[in-house]
Image (spheres, coloured by chain):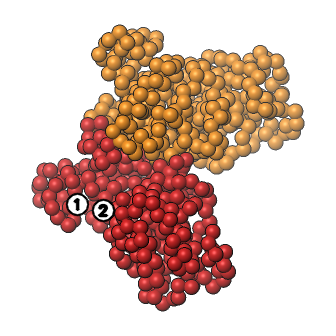
Chain colours: A orange, B red
Amino acid sequence: MSGAETADRAGRQIRVGLDVGGTKIDAVAVDGSGDILGRIRRSTGWGDDAVVESIVMAVTALADETGFPVSDIGSVGIGIPGLVDVAEGRVDHAVNLGVKSLDLAARAERMLGIPFRVENDVKAAALGAAVLSGVAGSMAYLNLGTGVAAGIVIDGRIWRGSRGTAGEVGHISVDPHGRLCGCGQLGCIETFCGGGALAKAWGRPGALPIRDIFDAADAGDAHASTLRDDLYHGAAAAVRILVLSADVETVVIGGGLTALGARLEDGIRTALHAGAEASPFMRSLRLDERIELLSAGSPAAAFGAALVGASVPEKEIVPHG
Amino acid sequence: MSGAETADRAGRQIRVGLDVGGTKIDAVAVDGSGDILGRIRRSTGWGDDAVVESIVMAVTALADETGFPVSDIGSVGIGIPGLVDVAEGRVDHAVNLGVKSLDLAARAERMLGIPFRVENDVKAAALGAAVLSGVAGSMAYLNLGTGVAAGIVIDGRIWRGSRGTAGEVGHISVDPHGRLCGCGQLGCIETFCGGGALAKAWGRPGALPIRDIFDAADAGDAHASTLRDDLYHGAAAAVRILVLSADVETVVIGGGLTALGARLEDGIRTALHAGAEASPFMRSLRLDERIELLSAGSPAAAFGAALVGASVPEKEIVPHG
C-alpha cells in the first residue's frame, strides 16, 4: 500500500478513470455523486515506460483541462487489456500495448502520489456500463471490438469467478466446421463477430473494414452479406450463452463495433428473434428484449475504471482478459 | 409457513432428502453432522395425487427402515424435475411425472406435519455434489441423463441467476448444422450428449441404449462410434462453456450416464485434452484436470435435497429446470 493510499483523503473527492486502449486513452473525472466533470482522449504509448508516461500525462491533462489540481484526485482506476493482477496492480501480456510485464499501479503512484488501481478493461467497462445503464441485479457486458469478451456484474460487483475466465465467451466454439480462431480452435464466437476476424475474412484494405462490409452487404455483395450475418449470428450466440449459463437479466453490448449503431443492434435482435422462432423454450426467454447497445463514444469503460479506482479490493485473484 | 415449521424443533435433528425421478424416488436420512443414516428407493407415482402419496410413503418408509419416528424429522427437502417455485413449494410442468401444477410442499406438510421445501432436481443435486465432493469455492454440476442441464454452486450456495436459467447449457447450440433438438433448435449440446437424443439417433431397441452404443462402438460399429464421439464432444463443450462463462473451478459430472463410469470419464477427458491441443489459451485452463465423475449410484441428489430442506430461503424467484 502506497503512502498516498494511507494519507488523509479529506477533500479528495475526485475519482479519475482511464480506459487504456491500443491507440487511445479515454479519461474521465467523476465527482462524489457520480457526475462526469471532464473527459479527454490522449494517445497511448508503446512499451512499459511509454504506457506509464501516457497514463500519467492523461491524468494531469485531465485535471488541467477540467480545472482542478492533481492533489484533489482521491483515486485513479485504470482499465487495461491483458492479464491483470488486481491485488498487485500489475498487467502482463498486454500485447497491443507492447507490454510484457508491468508494475503499473506502483509506478504511476510513485510519479503522482495518488492511489492507483488496475483492472482488466472489459471488466471495468462492464461495471461502468451496469451503472450508466441503470441495470440492477445481474448483467453481462458484451464487448464487440477487435476481439470479443464479456464481463459479468452482479448486484453492482464484478463477477470474477475462480480463475478470471468469467465472461470469456469469445473463445467458445459454436461451429465445429467454422473458421480458425487466433486462439487455435475452430468456430469460436470471436471468429463470427470479432472485428479482427471479420476484417481478415473480408481481406480488403480500408480504415473501417466492418463498415465497409456492411455497406457492401447493403449494395448486394454476397460475401459481405455472409460476413454480416456471421456477425449477427456470433453476437446472438454470445447473448444466448451468457443467459443460459450465468443467467444474467440483461446483456449490454459495447465496444468499437457499436459505431455501427442501429445497423448492429437491429441485426442482433433479429438474429435472436429468428433463432428462437422454432423453440418455445428460447422464445420464453425473450432475449431480443434483453439486449441494449451502448451509444458509440459512451464513457462506460473509463467511468467503470473510475469506480474500480475508488473501490476497496474484494478478493485477491488474478483475472484473465 | 406451516404450523410444523414454527413448532419447537428441539430434538428434531434428522433431515430427509428426496430425489424424485421419473421412475424412482431416492430418499436419504441425514443426521446433524451430515452423515447418511439410511437410504431407500421407491417407485414414483404418476400424476399429482400419486406423486404426493409416493413422496409421503417414501418418507415414512425411510423412517421405518432406518429406525426413527417421523416426528424426529426436522425437515424434508425434495429435488424434482420441472419448473419449481422455491418460495411457494410448487412444481409446474414436471412432464415426466404427469404433473402440470402441484402445490407439493403444502400438501405433503399437511399429511405429515413436517416442513417441506422443494427445489429443482439438478440444482439440489449440484448442492449435494458440491458438499459430497468437498469442492470449496465455485463448481458446476453437469447432469448427463435423458436431458442435459447444469447447476452452479458458489461458496456452498446454489447460484440462481435472474430468471432461473443458470446452467441451462443443454440448449446452447454448438453446431448450426447439428441434429434437431426437442427444444426446436439445431445442434444443442443435449443433441450431442443427452441420453434421450442419443438413444433416438441410435434407433435400436434395448433397455440400456447408451451402453449398447458404447459396446457397438467397441466392436467397430461406425455409427455407434460417431454417437459415442458426439457424447464426448457435447459433454466437453458443456464443460468449456461452464468455465468460460461462469468460470467455475470444477465441473462435477453426474446423472444416469455416469453408470458408464470410466468409459465416460476417460472419453470426456480425452475430448477436452484434444480440443485444447491447438490452443495455448485452452491448454492453460487445464480443463481435463478440472472434471470429476460422481460414482454411479451416488446419493448426491437426495443428499442435496436434504440440505435444501434444512436451509432457510434466500431469495424468492422461480427457477426453471
- Left or right: residue A248 compared with residue B178: right
Q: Nearer the viewer, residue A129 or A292?
A: A292
Residue at the spot 44% in from the left edge and 55% down from the top edge = B321
Disc number at residue A64?
none
Q: How many marks?
A: 2
The residue positioned farthest toward the bottom in the image shown: B67
Q: Earlier in the sequence, mark 2 or mark 1?
A: 1
Q: In the image, residue A272 lies at what x, y percent? A: 42, 33
Identify which amino acid the numbered label 2 is placed on: Leu
Q: In the image, residue B23 lies at what x, y percent? A: 32, 69
Q: In the image, residue B234 lies at what x, y percent? A: 31, 49
Does the rendering let one see residue A218?
yes
Identify which amino acid the numbered label 1 is placed on: Ile
Q: Which residue is mark 2?
A: B257
Q: Are marks 2 and 1 in contact (CB under 8 Å)?
A: yes
**Quarter location, residue B307:** bottom right
- Chain letter belonging to callout 1: B
Q: Which residue is mark 1?
A: B210
Residue at the spot 75% in from the left edge and 27% down from the top edge = A35
Residue at the spot 69% in from the left edge and 45% down from the top edge = A313
- Chain letter belonging to callout 2: B
- Element at label 2: helix
Classed neighbour count for the residue bearing mark 2: other residues with Cα under 10 Å, few (<14), some (14–19), many (≥20):
many
Indicate whether B165 appears above or below A270.
Answer: below
